[in-house]
Amino acid sequence: MKIVGLDAQGSRCAVTVELTPFPPLTRGALTTLQVNLGYRCNQSCAHCHVNAGPTRTEMLADELIDLIPEVLQHQGIQCLDLTGGAPELHPSFRRLVEQARALGVQVIDRCNLTILNEPGQDDLAAFLAHQGVRVVASLPCYSKDNVDQQRGDGVFERSLDGLRQLNALGYGRGHAHRCLDLVYNPLGPTLPPPQAALEADYKRELAALGVEFDNLLTLANMPIQRFARQLERTGELTTYQQRLQNAHNPANLAAVMCRSLISVDWTGQCFDCDFNQQLGLTSPGPIQHLRDLLETDLTIAGRPIRTDQHCFGCTAGAGSSCGGALQS
């Protein structure tokens, strides 16, 4: 198959790549509803696969926010995973968290840490702690230079400030209802290193800075959106796509997140995962919108999942998901 790449001089050219179709997948039980509340963010990270940033205005409408607790109850969903952008910037973020927690549903806040220091968010950390929200915080390295290169000048120090706020409230110290996990993703087109070994490095380096956390989750960068364009400019896109395919581990297929998760975008449309959402690859079958999850005769388990070449990013090596590596 020929796809467009860049040669050594930076000129566009056709490159032949041997692409193997991704294996077919079907759904298991639905345990997690992942909702993108909108693309507005206080940062513009180089690796961001949703192209989020301060100038984005897309936000989930309140009438759709109101459907979420109904869907959680109707489907018996155990976990509400809130993402963005910075999900905390949605005006109804706190109301939704309170409603989900009142139902006994676990809530994950995918937090960029610097949001805890933004004007108007002074009490955000205390709110998360009071509600028992699990915080999954992006910190792509324990090195100031690497973090600032990927996320902007000053982000590392602001992230440490956010982590210290959470630690002061009991996060990161093994408390079941104040869990603090960090997310690592590589700076460039490489696979993450072994998760356990890197977690030990993170804990050692951050402890020296007075910071604690519970778990490290390693994620591979997906060759889509902003990151894909960055790779195309440097002539590395085709090489990275081939690297992911060559590192495919069939043992990861049973645990990929799309088998137990449905992803909802800011318009209420449903997708098999967050990456399919950003590529506009809608789910096959009847689950097209959040409202469809309220149908009484809807069967989810056993339905096919839409896959494509980027899916090798989830099965390469030790695997990658919103919960980190799939294999030890």
Image: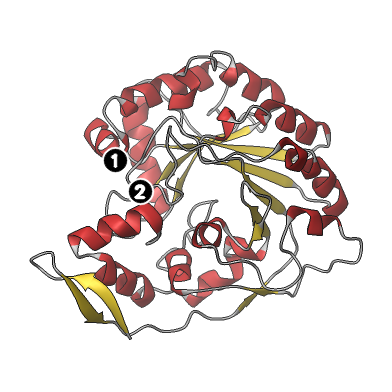
Q: Is residue 40 left or right of residue 132?
A: left
At 29% from the left and 24% from the top, the residue drawn is: 154
At 55% from the left and 51% from the top, the residue drawn is: 323
Residue 207, picture quadrant: top left
Quadrant containing the N terminus is bottom left
- Label 1 crowd bin: few (<14), some (14–19), many (20+), radius 10 Å: some
At 75% from the left and 75% from the top, the residue drawn is: 302
- Label 2 crowd bin: few (<14), some (14–19), many (20+), radius 10 Å: many
The kind of residue tagged 1 is Gln
Residue lying farthest to the right in this orientation:
296
Residue 275's place in the image compared with 249, above or below, is: above
| Residue 141 location (% of width, % of height) | 32, 39
Residue 89's place in the image compared with 243, above or below, is: above
SS assignment at label 2 = loop
Q: Is residue 300 left or right of residue 54?
A: right
| Residue 325 location (% of width, % of height) | 48, 56
Check residue 119 in the rendering and tell me which mark sits there, or answer none: none
SS assignment at label 1 = helix
Q: What residue did someone put label 2 on?
A: 47
Residue 25's place in the image compared with 65, above or below, is: below
Mark 2 or mark 1: name the one nearer the start of the chain: 2
